[in-house]
Amino acid sequence: MSKGLPPMPKIQELIRLYGLSAKQQLSQNFLLDLNITSKICKLAGGFKDCTVIEVGAGPGGLTRSILAAGAKKVIAVEMDPRFYPALKMLEEASEGRLSIVMANMMDVDEAQILSDYRAEKTAWPQQSKVKLIGNLPFNVGTHLMLKWLRQIQPQEGLYQFGRVPLYLMFQKELSDRIAAPIGTHDYTRLSVMVQQLYQPKIIYEVPRKVFVPAPKVDASVIALEPRIKPIGDVQSPEYFEYVCREIFTQKRKVLSNGIKILGPNAEKDLLEGINVNLRPQNVTIEDFVKIANRFTAWEGKKKNIDLLEFKNQGKSLRKDQKQEQEIVDLQNRMKKIKTKLREKEIEKQEKKKQKDLELAQALAEIDNEPDEMAQLVPKDKQKATQHMSTLLKQSQEDDQDEYDQLFDDEKVTQEEHYQHLLDKYQDQIDYVKESQLERAHQKEIIKQNRAIIDTTLINNNNNNSKKNNNKNSDTDNDFDQLLLDENIDYEALLNDIDNIDINDIKKNY
């Protein structure tokens, strides 16, 4: 280890001195075992006389090993300010070989910081004097990989300084996909895109138990050496990425079917000389390049492909433009919602008129019922009328509240709102109809059991069957008198009717 470089504090000392702990939202997992970090540096070929960009330096475990491996200059990029004191301690002891950049790597201009620290540029075929290494946060590893991948063909950013190799620690699953050979399950669009430009090799597998805190998966260190000459001549990196992505969404389909996602007749126009019976995981990188180049010049491709989604210049351009587009989309959506709401408001008023009409008709039918029903259930009718009026008023208030809150509550979609209103209206109509049916049913019960009621009244008033037979002509009058009794217990009467034994009535007759 370099002269004057302080020894690595124990984990407990780091936590006590600087109050450090891994943040789950930043996917932080620290690698503090110097034996492992030193081995990674050795497997990366060493860093003697190189300028090294370290991504996600954290408390400085890997940083110490890079300095010990003889790096000419180490640029440690870290976005979490809690680690600054620990890194500053290393910087002061490194005799000018370590510089700290507190920033998010997604926003860092690699060409600028390499120029600031006077890194050496080399010709493309030569071995680069610049290297990049990092224990990447698991939640942003793919995004950073794509950022550097998009810089390599135009030789922008990092690759203004030559054929810079990358030594990246990913979760094992991602490393396996990047390095997967053709014909395997792990061969994906990322495999095609990376291998077209880099030669990947997994150089070390890191068990999860050596991290603090331990993640749920193992990790791997993968070396990515830029090819002197890429596989195939990609005419448009954006369209190449788009084609790979779209075709691999149809992974279970053979190429002749899956490629149709690119546009009508794509299977006829883009697959000449290519085996159409292969699935994406069996298609070579060369063939993907051919398909993408044909797609670039193809008149049948979609007109509104959002290439911004596949482009990142290493700054906040993509993020800012995406946010601006989201605002525009939201404004357009709000206009559509307002227009739809106006239409639904008109529709609601029409439905309200229709509902009020049906309600009025239902109440009129109740008011026009025969006198016996009107006298039999006057209180029930009054309660039903009051209940329906209250329900209607409450529904109108609820509808207005929901209308006012629609724009404040994004969890409720407009379709759910409209359907909810329609369901309410239907429930109210159903209530009126059920009331009508209930009253009709009650009337039917009275009619069906009228003979039994007549007989019961006659038997209760006079047990002489002959006398009762002489009064058969007066039974209607007796029944009317019964219904005129204001003290009648309607429910008890129905229970009595239900308990009457028909056989006993027949015997009395």
Image (tube, rainbow, N blue to C red):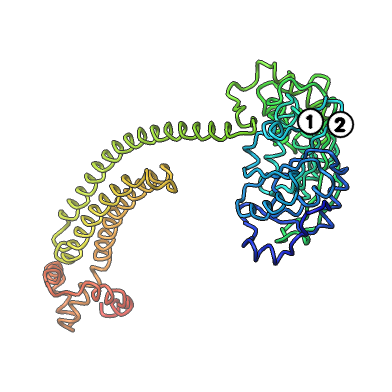
308 and 245: which one is in front? Answer: 308
452 and 365: which one is in front? Answer: 365
Discs 1, 2 touching: Cβ within 8 Å: no
The disc labelled 2 sits on which kind of residue? Answer: Gln
At horizontal 18% and vertical 81% (from top left) the residue drawn is: 460
Image location of residue 291, percent across then percent down: 76, 23
Outermost bottom residue: 463
Report the residue marked by disc 1.
120
Can you say which quadrant of the picture contains the C terminus? bottom left
Image location of residue 63, percent across then percent down: 76, 50
Compute the Cα span from label 1 to label 2: 11 Å
The disc labelled 1 sits on which kind of residue? Answer: Glu
Image location of residue 33, percent across then percent down: 79, 59
* Secondary structure category for the residue under label 2: loop
Report the residue marked by disc 2.
127
Q: Earlier in the sequence, mark 1 or mark 2?
A: 1
Relative to 400, 213 lies left or right? right
Relative to 476, 140 lies left or right? right
At horizontal 21% and vertical 55% (from top left) the residue drawn is: 389
Please identify the quarter of the rendering in which residue 505 is found: bottom left
